[in-house]
Image (spheres, coloured by chain):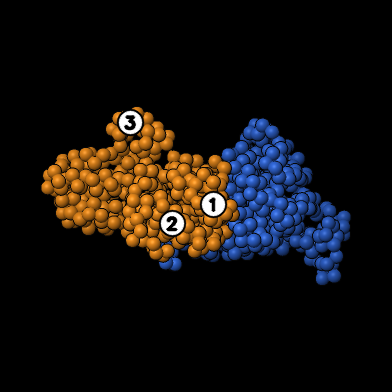
Chain colours: A blue, B orange
Amino acid sequence: MPTSQTVARPVEDGLTADQLHSFLHQMLFIRRFEEKCGEMYTRGKIRGFLHLYTGQEACAVGSFATLGEQDKIVTHYRDHGHAIARGVDPNRIMAELFGRVDGLSSGRGGSMHLYDTSKGFLGGYAIVAAHLPLAVGLGMAANMKKDNSLAFCVFGDGSVAEGEFHEALNLAALWKTPVIFFCENNLYGMGVPISESLSTEITTLAAAYNMPAVKIDGMDVLDVYRETQKAVEHCRSGQGPYFIEAMTYRYRGHSMADPELYRLKDEVEDARRRDCIARLRTHMQELGLIDDDSFAALQQRVDEEMDEVVAFADASPEPGLDTLFDHVVKESVRA
Amino acid sequence: MPELRYRDALREALREELIRDDRVFLMGEDIGAYGGSYAVTRGLLDEFGRDRVIDTPIAESGIVGAGIGAAMAGMRPMVELMTINFSFLALDQIVNSAAKLHYMSNGQINVPLVIRMASGGGSQLGATHSHSLEGLYAHFPGLRVVCPSTPADAKGLLKRAFRDENTTIFIEHTALYGMRGEVPDDPDYLIEFGKANVLREGTDVTIVGYSGSTWQAVRAADMLEEQEGISAEVIDLRCLRPLDIDTVIASVKKTNRAVVVEDDWQFGGFAGEISAQLMEQAFDWLDAPVARVCGKDVPLPYNRNLEFAALPSEEDVVEAVLAML
């Protein structure tokens, strides 16, 4: 890792070497975390639906680096990478996937429903597009409380054909709420390609609701960072919502149950040639920030971190059956 | 004590809560300049301004979702959906987000949101605008379901809803908006959730209602007393969730008979829930099967005579009571 002398020196778009190292570390961490989840699923430690984020890491890492602590995040059900990029404790994420008491929700939420309110991470939502209106409400509250926060709403291309997408964009623009709509376009809604579910371009639809709408390279963490920074400035200055379509690709199936009959292996290989981690690594090598040895050391470190994550989750007990009825409703304390 | 109409009591509750707590705001279809479809919010836009009384587009899912988001961020919103018929368009937001977030997040998130809507048939509005679906919402754990039958309850329960930490589905009855009654003017007049109201005491049979059907129960009790010399006890449930079954059971232990009245369809409905709980918890005290007097198993027709034939009446209640005695 860089020494203190290299930390403050901007090497790229106002980014320091330390930040680039952090991006690389985070993306690699998410990649390994997801691969470990796949392994734990086949070993029966993780059950239910499991949607892996491999391939899309640059979206979460690049965009979340532009946000402040006061900001609120809602995302879709492929949410492990977002939680990690937001600084949520990966031990507790894995424990949640194991359904254990030390999980973020003590095993009540599962893979698709991760929450950590202490980080402004307000959840993964598993009804497609259902959280877009929630983001509008978070933005309304930000305006009313004047707390300089914004709502960051991540969703997939599959959300765009839902009615709530259109209701939310209209309301956000109408009421000038500080919401960044961040569409991770991985080209498929489960197995249906976007060409068979949308009659037009996503940014065309978003722009029709009278907000800036840009299409970016979601496989390039620096591009994601740069473009999201513009969106954050737009929202913070009271100009209302901003729309980003990040072109990305998921390497694994929609979920662990997906036999991937709808796409060719060549297509996946093509996408892997644009891999976000490999690209940043090459870029950092060109800048002289990393070499083969230090990258290998980073991989080694992440592997060790992952062993700790799994050990933590596995050591955590099952929630007691006597907690089944806890938190169905919140009892009122005030008269 | 001042006498107010049901709609005015609701407005008074909204106004007092807007004054009391600056986190409270109202949004909904035509609640501002128009004053609300049932004139509940009339005048509030002028008094509190556009930041706190917000006219919305016709986008039920969007505005309920926005209400949930604002509530998650610490506000105390109220969303008016005009009528319960339109709440279907927001059902996913209500069921999957408002009702479940507290549980799924293991208590990290709660959604203190009030969703108001009008319910009830009898106005020849046809099959899509005459639903009574209180029981549908009562099905979902995590929600509060409240349905006042008097002006005083309308105020006290609505104010209580704003002070709850969970989402309250607050269902008003279209036939009651003009009803007058005494309403306390205490700005802290609250009626606790889950406390049924014994409106009339009796010894021979218990008649259970809520919302509009409470008054069919009361009128039936009057008829039974006058015409048959039968003493009926009438219980207004007030809340379907949390449900005060204890008050109903205590009454049945005294009367040994029960009739449940509701506008909603009988099949799979809330009257069946009351009946089942009485069977489970008061079987030894029942001298007759619990009777249900509910809406007929048809979409509500437009024609006046057909519509009235499809809705429960006080005569139906009287008939049910006579059949079990």
Q: Whole-percent x and y of residue A194?
A: 66, 35
Query: Could you say whether the residue bearing mark 1 is in a helix, strand or loop?
Result: helix
Q: Amino acid at mark 3?
A: Arg
Q: Looking at this rendering, what residue extends furthest in the left direction?
A: B229
Q: Quadrant of residue B261?
A: top left
Q: Earlier in the sequence, mark 1 or mark 3?
A: 1
Q: Earlier in the sequence, mark 3 or mark 2?
A: 2
Q: Amino acid at mark 1?
A: Leu
Distance between the Cα atoms at labels 1 and 2?
Answer: 14 Å
Count of number-bearing discs: 3
Q: Earlier in the sequence, mark 1 or mark 2?
A: 2
Image side of residue A318 versus residue B249, left or right: right
Which chain is disc 3 placed on?
Answer: B
Q: Which residue is mark 3?
A: B304
Q: Whole-percent x and y of residue B301?
A: 36, 30
- Return the residue nearer the eye: B73 or B311: B311
Distance between the Cα atoms at labels 1 and 3?
Answer: 36 Å
